[in-house]
Each structure stands twice: as structure tokens, then as C-alpha cells.
Image (cartoon, rainbow, N blue to C red):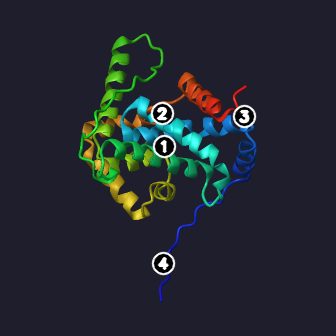
Amino acid sequence: MRQAHVTSLPPVSSGDAELVQRAIARDEAAIRAIMQANNRRLFRLARGILRNDNEAEDAVQDAYVRAFTHLDQFRGDSSLSTWLSRIAINEALSRVRSRRSNVEWSELPKGALEAQIIQFPLSSTDDPEKSMAQREIQQVVEHAIDELPEAFRLVFITRVIEGMNVEETADILGLKPETVKTRLHRARTMLRDNVERKIGPIVMEAFPFAGRRCERLTEAVLKRLGTAA
């Protein structure tokens, strides 16, 4: 009898385990390290559901507070990043459900929520036309991603923008690897050819979350946890 193939995810790293124990003891440096390593990913995932900067940031902050408050429940069956990602996704989904009762996230209609364009930090250049073209391409990319249906947008963000592999994406989103592959293929198909050609050189810079915004979120969570200096 042929046995089904089971994908095994790598166990929690020793670095994660040490950080978790220190964070449980409310070690500020450990909490900062965990957040700074995961801020961008959690923000992108939350925004992929909520499609609003401020709501996504609030959702991530609440997710962190919930995670750090119950950090003793982290068993290491998956990576700490994956565990945090699930909490952030659930927090974002709960916000969608609270304002759109009885609507499943995978069934939300196209364009159900108003997209908000994020201003990207552009590299300095002496060519104003080049800067304008880059800004327009970035806006086209974000619009195209925001217009994808929820189920396909999350897979696209995790696989393409965040660069997660199929197995990790499947674990985070609770999908089968085959479903991840199918949804990614459909997501790419939904994006127009001219947008697809422009995604390559700039997609890794989409939905930035660093600098002052990253620090502000970290400080807010530390204050709520009572560990800020």
C-alpha cells in the first residue's frame, strides 16, 4: 500500500528557543530582536488581508501583545516566525469578520475593501522622469496586488513578496502545498502581462516596513507589555 507523503517542517532553531525563553522572562532585548526580525513579514501579511496601512499596523501590534502574553504556549512545532505569522493572520481576519459578519476571508469579492496606496521610499536620483516612472510602477504593482481576491493575494504575498517556500506558505495559511501552487499560478495569471513584467526588479521592496515605523511599533508593544525602559 502506497504511503502518503508527509512534508516535515524544520524544528524550532536553538536561537528561537533561547529568544523565546528570554522573552518569556520579559527580556527587552529579546523582545526587540523577535519583533525586528518579524515586523515586515507580519505587516505584509496583515496588510494583505486588511489592505490598509493603519489597520494592518494595529493588527500586528495586537498580535504581538497576544503572542508575547502567551509565549509559554509556543511549543516549537514550527518556527517562531511561522507561529507569529499565524497569530497576525488570525488577528487580521478577525478584524475583517467583525466588520463584515458571516463573510469568509477566502470568499470576499474582488475590491471589497478600498485599497490604500503606500508611499515607497525612493532612491535619490537626479533624473526626475526616472523617479516618476518608478513611483508609477510601484503604484501599479500595489494596485494590482490589492485587487487580487483575498485567497490569492495572501499566497502571492507570502510566496513572491516575502519569498517563502511552498511548504512554509502552506503551513502558515493552512493549505495543501498543491493548493499553494495552484493559487499562485492563478494569482500570476490575474495580473496583467505589462504589470507582471514590471514586478521583477521592485517586488522585494513592496510594502516596506522599516525605520521609524518599525521602531514605533516595537516601542508601542514594549510599552503595553510593561518592559520598556
Using the rendered view, name the quadrant where residue 110 is placed.
Answer: top left
Check disc 2: other Cα within 10 Å, few if <14, some if 14-19, many if 20+: some
Q: Position of residue 146 (x, y in %)?
A: 32, 38
Q: Nearer the viewer, mark 4 or mark 2?
A: 2
Q: Earlier in the sequence, mark 1 or mark 2?
A: 2
The residue type indicated by label 3 comes to Glu
Q: Is residue 167 left or right of residue 25?
A: left
How far apart marks 3 and 1 lie (CA) works out to 26 Å
Residue under numbered circle 1: 162
Between 13 and 46, the one lying in front of the other is 46
Residue under numbered circle 4: 4
* The label number, if any, that marks residue 28 in the structure image: 3
Q: Position of residue 218 (x, y in %)?
A: 60, 30
Q: Earlier in the sequence, mark 3 or mark 1?
A: 3
Check disc 1: other Cα within 10 Å, few if <14, some if 14-19, many if 20+: some
Between 191 and 61, the one lying in front of the other is 61
The residue type indicated by label 2 comes to Asp
The residue type indicated by label 1 comes to Glu
Q: Earlier in the sequence, mark 2 or mark 3?
A: 3
What residue is rendered at 58% in x and 40% in y? 65
